[in-house]
Image: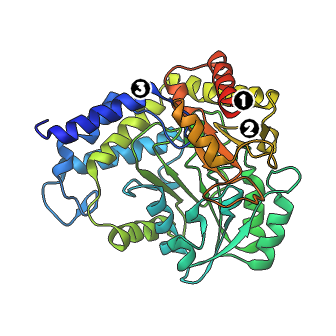
């Protein structure tokens, strides 16, 4: 690379990544093949439209690339082309969710999503997001005592508020989601059911977590978390008389985006093929084993684990413990100084401000990619405990 400044920064970031323990729940490490696709000549191609329906010439190759990504997405999750439509052009998770709402929710309509402070995502209707400015959020959350989803209350809220869409799938909820009960709430209220499986997609692909496809109308996901791909997103929609897929395609392009990033789509295709290999099932299983071990070990050392444990890659830890410990920001800062990267995070019914909440969020996908197993998680728990108790 001739640009010495950028070259040095790239080398510095590579070095930083290698020397830290990465427990960011939304990060992972991609393969060299994924990186090669991202840096390929596909970067040069402008391809507005969809395969076979482009606005520029010269798309014979990118049409094949995009079609292959769609084919692999369906195959990975065991879906039939005649039953499910896939859009692979969304640039990331937030634009993917926005596209669904633009396509299917009337402006000012109701989006029923989990409250941000209880584990939901900004794009599930929170007021600081565009999704909360153009639509109205109907929030739901967890039981205060158990810190797990209260499906009966959720159904009552849905029946009363009659949202246009119910969003399941969360950014800081460690427990297994009962998709069937979310479907029942959607049916009772006449709502569409959208599952944002961004955090658990790799676990679903690896058969280590229940699949939402049996119950959902729409499924969105990022590719760069447990699915171990590039920063991108997929949107799945049921094929039926409602024409959900066609509406979503129009919302993505020309509604929200111009030319798709075909280099990114190629990298998605590579990651989807990697996730279909038998080794990926072992990887997904190990992610969960590592998360459970890390949660159990921290619990043994006196740190309060939200909901009492985890069923996924994700752990939410109450580090504040009503003033007996450290705040989430302080915990994150202390750990980073010692080479352990986490993120501060609100816990359910948090009394502290979002900028300095009561907890931290941990994830095991990235370190599992590096080959870490249960014995390593025990050592990491010991280090975390020692650092936070200094």
Q: Residue furthest front?
A: 390
What element does badge 3 sit on?
Answer: helix
Q: CA distance from mark 2 to mark 1?
A: 6 Å
Q: Sort mark 3 into few (<14), some (14-19) or many (20+) by Cα contacts within 10 Å.
A: few
**Is 204 positioned to the left or the right of 304 in the image?**
left
Depth check: give the residue in front, 67 or 291: 291
Q: Indicate which disc residue 292 carries.
A: 1
**Image quarter of residue 297:** top right
What element does badge 2 sit on?
Answer: loop
Depth check: give the residue in front, 215 or 354: 354
Q: Which residue is mark 3?
A: 18
Whether pointer 2 and pointer 1 mark residues with C-beta atoms closer than 8 Å, the reply is: yes
Q: Is residue 154 above or below residue 66?
A: below
Nearest-to-viewer mark from 2 and 3: 3
Give residue 108's position: percent from left, percent from top.
58, 84
Q: Is residue 16 above or below residue 244?
A: above
């Amino acid at each position: 690379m001739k640009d010495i400044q950028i070259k040095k920064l790239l080398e510095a970031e590579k070095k930083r990544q290698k020397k830290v323990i990465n427990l960011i729940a939304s990060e992972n490490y991609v393969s060299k093949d994924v990186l090669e696709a991202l840096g390929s000549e596909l970067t040069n191609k402008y391809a507005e439209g969809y395969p076979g329906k482009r606005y520029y010439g010269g798309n014979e190759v990118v049409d094949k690339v995009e079609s292959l990504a769609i084919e692999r997405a369906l195959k990975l999750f065991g879906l039939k082309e005649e039953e499910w439509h896939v859009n692979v052009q969304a640039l990331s998770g937030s634009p993917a969710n926005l596209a669904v709402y633009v396509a299917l929710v009337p402006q000012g309509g109701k989006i029923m999503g989990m409250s941000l402070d209880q584990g939901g995502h900004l794009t599930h209707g929170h007021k600081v997001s565009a999704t909360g400015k153009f639509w109205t959020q109907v929030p739901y959350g967890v039981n205060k005592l158990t810190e797990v989803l209260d499906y009966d209350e959720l159904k009552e809220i849905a029946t009363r508020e009659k949202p246009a869409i119910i969003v399941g799938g969360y950014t800081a909820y460690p427990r297994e989601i009962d998709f069937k009960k979310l479907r029942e709430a959607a049916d009772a209220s006449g709502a569409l059911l959208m599952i944002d499986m961004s955090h658990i997609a790799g676990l679903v692909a690896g058969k280590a977590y229940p699949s939402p496809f049996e119950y959902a109308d729409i499924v969105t996901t990022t590719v760069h978390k447990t699915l171990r791909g590039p920063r991108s997103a997929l949107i799945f929609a049921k094929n039926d008389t409602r024409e959900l897929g066609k509406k979503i395609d129009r919302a993505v392009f020309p509604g929200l985006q111009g030319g798709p990033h075909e280099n990114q789509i190629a990298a998605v295709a590579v990651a989807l093929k990697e996730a279909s290999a038998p080794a990926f099932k072992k990887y997904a299983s190990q992610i969960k084993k590592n998360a459970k071990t890390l949660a159990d070990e921290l619990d043994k050392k006196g740190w309060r684990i939200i909901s009492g444990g985890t069923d996924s890659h994700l752990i939410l830890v109450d580090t504040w413990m009503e003033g007996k410990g450290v705040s989430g920001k302080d915990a994150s800062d202390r750990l980073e100084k010692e080479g352990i990267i986490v993120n501060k995070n609100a816990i359910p019914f948090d009394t502290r401000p979002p900028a300095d909440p009561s907890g931290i969020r941990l994830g095991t996908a990235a370190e599992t990619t590096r080959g870490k197993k249960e014995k390593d998680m025990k050592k990491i728990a010991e280090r975390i405990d020692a650092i936070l108790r200094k």
